[in-house]
Amino acid sequence: MQVAASLPLPPSPSNATDYACFTDDWSAIRRPEHPLVVQRRAVPLCDGHVLTRDPFTWRASGAPDRAAAALGDLPGALAEDIAMLATRLAALMLCEEVRLRLELVDDDSCRKLHADFTDLRLITTYAGRGTQFACGNVPDGEVWSIDAGDIALVKGWQFGEGHDPCLHRSPPIAGTGERRLLLAIDTPRIDPEPGA
């Protein structure tokens, strides 16, 4: 799979860098001052036939490579990227297994700003608009978005004492005809809330 090198920082509110860290070094998420780490990258090459399917949510768990293979009938480049991200997250969090969720959505799946009941979640969008984050990590005011392709490491409520969770939401797309193909990867340590 060919992925471009890291891209320049995105235009974002000046206070985004007060709580978000833009870097290729995922270990930066261990710093208490950063509830969010963003790695900029180009959208990995992906066969567009996935986007023509009916909206879906596919889940799998287990060792990173096996979980990625268990997601379903995916184009090779997409499956390779998911396996690579899952392997890298497992190494970062010192876990042998991960939980994957690949979704094709055409609605506002998580329209309210929220923090996840997890320790750490990786979010990336392969098609459509990227995830939105609360400016200053506070629930009031404007939001800013990462781009499709970008990787977000998002702290949840269970990351650890002294670490604030990251407030985020899905971009509003209901009724626009837009579709998003997004991936979320969690560690197996925390059971998500029902329906999460």
Image: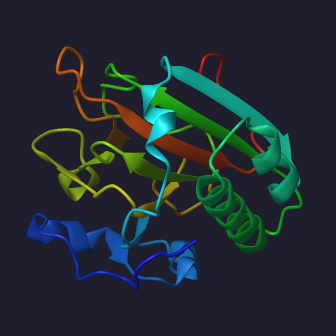
Between 49 and 154, the one nearer to me in the picture: 49
Measured as percent of width and height from the top left, residue 90 is found at 76, 64
Measured as percent of width and height from the top left, residue 86 is found at 70, 60
Q: Residue at x 68, y 62 (%)?
A: 80
Residue 177 lies in quadrant: top left
Between 107 and 165, the one nearer to me in the picture: 107
Q: Residue at x 38, y 26 (%)?
A: 110
Q: Quadrant of the C terminus?
A: top right
Q: Quadrant of the N terminus?
A: bottom right
Q: Is residue 165 at all visible to an observer of this figure? A: no
Q: Is residue 125 above or below residue 90?
A: above
Q: Residue at x 46, y 61 (%)?
A: 45
Measured as percent of width and height from the top left, residue 50 is found at 51, 35
Residue 133 in the figure: left or right of residue 36:
left
Residue 94 in the figure: left or right of residue 132:
right
Q: Is residue 177 at all visible to an observer of this figure? A: yes
Q: Residue at x 74, y 67 (%)?
A: 93
Residue 20 in the figure: left or right of residue 142:
right
Measured as percent of width and height from the top left, residue 76 is found at 66, 55
Q: Is residue 116 above or below residue 52?
A: below
Model colouring:
rainbow
